[in-house]
Image (tube, rainbow, N blue to C red):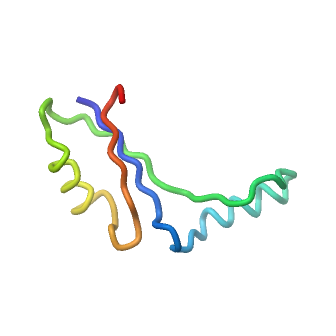
Amino acid sequence: MKVKIYVTLKNGVLDPQGQAVQKTLRRTGFEEVADVRIGKYIELEVADGTTTARLEEMCRKLLANTVIEDFKIVEAGA
């Protein structure tokens, strides 16, 4: 089973990489861009029947820094 995981910074956490991209977009003529947030996209192939709880455990222990990041798990086809 294929699983997609999106990891993003929590609201209120500064995103220097996103700020740099936003400034560069504005400098190159894309003034309509008000904000940019940069995150991670992770795709896992796991055994059928892997539970959401198990996937969340993977995220909490390794894939996301839950102090400053949120994560969202989406199963393929969803």
Q: Is residue 67 left or right of residue 21?
A: left
Q: Is residue 51 left or right of residue 8?
A: left
The percent position of residue 74, horizontal first and vertical second, equals: 34, 39
Q: Is residue 75 left or right of residue 30?
A: left
Q: Quadrant of the C terminus?
A: top left
Q: What residue lies at 35% left-to-right and 39% top-to-bottom? A: 4
Q: Nearer the viewer, residue 70 or 21?
A: 70
Q: What residue lies at 41% left-to-right and 71% top-to-bottom? A: 68
Q: Quadrant of the N terminus?
A: top left
Q: Splitting the image into 4 quarters, where does residue 31 fall?
A: bottom right
The percent position of residue 60, horizontal first and vertical second, equals: 25, 61
Q: Nearer the viewer, residue 77 or 40?
A: 77
Residue lying farthest to the right in this orientation: 29
Q: Nearer the viewer, residue 77 or 19?
A: 77
Depicted 10 relative to depicted 74: above or below: below
Q: Splitting the image into 4 quarters, where does residue 76 fall?
A: top left
The percent position of residue 25, horizontal first and vertical second, equals: 77, 55
Residue lying farthest to the top in this orientation: 77
Depicted 70 relative to depicted 74: above or below: below
Q: What residue lies at 27% left-to-right and 56% top-to-bottom? A: 59
Q: Count the labels in the image.
A: 0
Q: What residue lies at 43% left-to-right and 46% top-to-bottom? A: 41
